[in-house]
Image: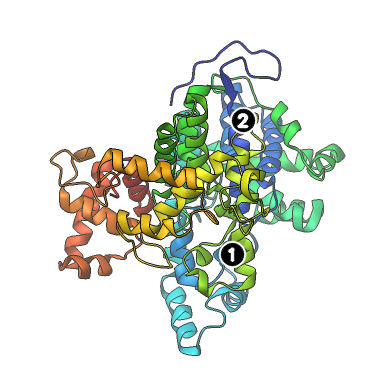
């Protein structure tokens, strides 16, 4: 995504442009929810980083890079949650937050306490013992793999959002530590300065939220020269006596202040026509939460757009419905992957309540972006029903915006025609038959009619289960490599892939190495994201 800098006109973007910081703020809030930290964790960390940047006299380019990296620091946080949840057999959001921020992995007593609290609670003794043994043997490497996946995805999202290479590079190294204890083993000044600042301020903000300024200062002193860069710590300690610093951090919201701190740069504004790219990034960010949801939001957005076109709605309304369809599930980032991968019949009352609030969370996230104001009501209402038995507001009939009714139909069709935790996929005709029984009380007749008409107009195979064999897969991929990528997206391990394909695990490993090399990634989630971006899942 390219940026072209328009004239700066005060605090508001010029006509035809969107302020990129508004979009990054929304993504940062989504990431805060996804990692289980209070709203504006990333924004407050960014504020700390900019204060440190002033103290260190960073160049204007470095300050701009730090600002955007600070807001995007957790942009890859949904990348490994499905894998982590499967291992824990538990709510991985709370577990990851407490492990990363508040557990010293070098202290066996703290690690044992974390294991006791989070690994397979409530499972039979033999199951829990096996999971604990697996963590003892493989937990450290699995955690490092998770960080590597997270960093690669964050860097990819930054690239897609048009961020400069400085930001992309910083995000790829954002978990590296001064003493070399990070996932990649880089140490000292081999870690980009922006990464060192972002890593440090993330912890300082988290500890300040729990224990106040004393806790943040103590943490900085304890980790100086270890995980934290001494220069960054010294800059922080030099401003820690300023009461204004703490009073700002302790405000209910600091976003308006942080928005005003954005340094002038060629990346401040984005053409409105590029919002499609942003919506796609938000869609993929949400869909990484579950093995079952890869590509779901893209398919819903595409189908809702086709339905709206079939109904001959105005072009602007069609575009709005498509974007809303792409971002309809953004609020699911606040729901544990462990919950998303369970059949609805097995959800506890607490889990069900968290799930049914995901439209509320999406509304809360996107309300920060003025240019998206027209589509937020569509996203907030996409699980409402005509009979008033939907969620989260219990709207009924004409209270539900037409666009939301259309997204509901597209969403239901995609769920039925793709595997979910509740049931395997059915074909298009069977899906339409099932949905026809829901029309009038759950689903909108006009929207359902538009779906049926669009499918008929496009032919019986208008939503193909899978693309045909192709001699021209992207990046020179072979048919077998695409087949392996599809299994990878579903979360299968190498032994599971080998069993399904009736080949050796060594053969699968060799294929994966070739895939990573061809598509320019180094992790399985990076490859999965490539598959989604290039529509290789069907």
**Dot 2 alpha-carbon crowd within 10 angstroms: few under 14, some 14 to 19, many 20 or more:** many
- Report which residue position mark 2 lands on: 21
The numbered mark, 1 or 2, whose residue comes first in the sequence reads 2
Camera-nearest residue between 105 and 521? 521
Q: Is residue 345 above or below residue 354?
A: below
Which residue, as the protein is rendered here, is positioned at the far left? 471
- Report which residue position mark 1 lands on: 99
Residue drawn at (60%, 71%) of the image? 107
Residue drawn at (68%, 53%) of the image? 393
Q: Position of residue 186 (x, y in %)?
A: 46, 48
Q: Is residue 197 visible?
A: no
Q: Is residue 115 above or below residue 323?
A: below
Residue drawn at (71%, 52%) of the image? 221
Element carrying mark 2 = helix
Image check: 56 left or right of 318? right
Q: Which mark is residue 350?
A: none
Q: Which quadrant of the rendered structure holds the N terminus?
A: top left
Label 1 – label 2 distance at C-alpha: 30 Å
Image check: 247 left or right of 120? right
């Amino acid at each position: 995504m390219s940026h072209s800098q328009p004239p700066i006109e005060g605090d508001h973007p010029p006509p035809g442009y969107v302020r990129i910081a508004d979009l990054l703020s929304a993504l940062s809030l989504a990431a805060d929810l996804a990692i289980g930290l209070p709203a504006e964790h990333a924004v407050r960390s960014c504020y700390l980083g900019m204060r440190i940047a002033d103290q260190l006299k960073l160049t204007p380019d470095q300050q701009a890079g730090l600002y955007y990296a600070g807001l995007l620091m957790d942009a890859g946080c949904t990348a490994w949650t499905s894998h982590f949840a499967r291992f824990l057999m538990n709510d991985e959001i709370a577990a990851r937050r407490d492990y990363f921020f508040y557990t010293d992995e070098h202290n066996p007593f703290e690690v044992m306490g974390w294991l006791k609290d989070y690994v397979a609670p409530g499972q039979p003794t033999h199951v829990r013992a096996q999971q604990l043994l697996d963590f003892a043997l493989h937990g450290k490497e699995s955690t490092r793999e998770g960080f590597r996946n997270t960093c690669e995805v964050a860097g990819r999202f930054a690239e897609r959002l048009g961020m400069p290479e400085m930001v992309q590079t910083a995000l790829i190294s954002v978990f590296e530590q001064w003493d070399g204890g990070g996932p990649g083993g880089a140490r000292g000044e081999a870690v980009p300065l922006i990464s060192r600042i972002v890593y440090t301020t993330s912890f300082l903000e988290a500890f300040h939220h729990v224990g106040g300024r004393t806790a943040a200062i103590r943490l900085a002193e304890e980790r100086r020269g270890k995980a934290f860069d001494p220069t960054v710590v010294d800059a922080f300690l030099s401003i820690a006596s300023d009461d204004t610093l703490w009073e700002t951090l302790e405000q209910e919201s600091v976003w308006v202040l942080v928005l005003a701190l954005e340094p002038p740069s060629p990346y401040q504004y984005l053409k409105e026509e590029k919002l499609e790219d942003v919506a796609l990034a938000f869609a993929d960010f949400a869909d990484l939460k579950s093995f079952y949801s890869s590509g779901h939001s893209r398919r819903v957005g595409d189908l809702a757009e086709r339905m709206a076109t079939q109904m001959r709605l105005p072009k602007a309304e069609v575009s709005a419905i498509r974007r809303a369809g792409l971002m309809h599930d953004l609020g699911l980032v606040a729901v544990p992957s462990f919950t998303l991968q369970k059949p609805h019949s097995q959800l506890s009352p607490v889990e069900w309540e968290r799930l049914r609030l995901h439209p509320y969370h999406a509304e809360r996230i996107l309300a920060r972006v003025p240019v998206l104001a027209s589509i937020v009501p569509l996203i907030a209402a996409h699980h409402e029903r005509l009979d008033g038995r939907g969620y989260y507001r219990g709207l009924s009939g004409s209270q539900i915006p037409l666009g939301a009714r259309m997204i509901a139909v597209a969403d239901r069709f995609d769920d039925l025609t793709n595997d979910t935790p509740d049931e395997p996929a059915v074909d298009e005709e069977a899906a339409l038959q099932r949905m026809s029984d829901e029309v009038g009380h759950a689903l909108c007749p006009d929207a359902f009619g538009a779906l049926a008409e669009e499918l008929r107009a496009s032919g019986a195979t208008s939503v193909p289960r899978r693309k045909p064999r192709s001699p021209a897969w992207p990046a020179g991929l072979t048919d077998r490599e695409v087949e392996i990528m599809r299994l990878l997206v579903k979360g299968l391990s190498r032994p599971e892939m080998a069993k399904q394909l009736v080949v050796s695990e060594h053969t699968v490993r060799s294929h994966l190495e070739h895939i990573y090399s061809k598509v320019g990634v180094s992790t399985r989630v990076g490859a999965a994201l490539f598959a989604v971006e290039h529509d290789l899942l069907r």
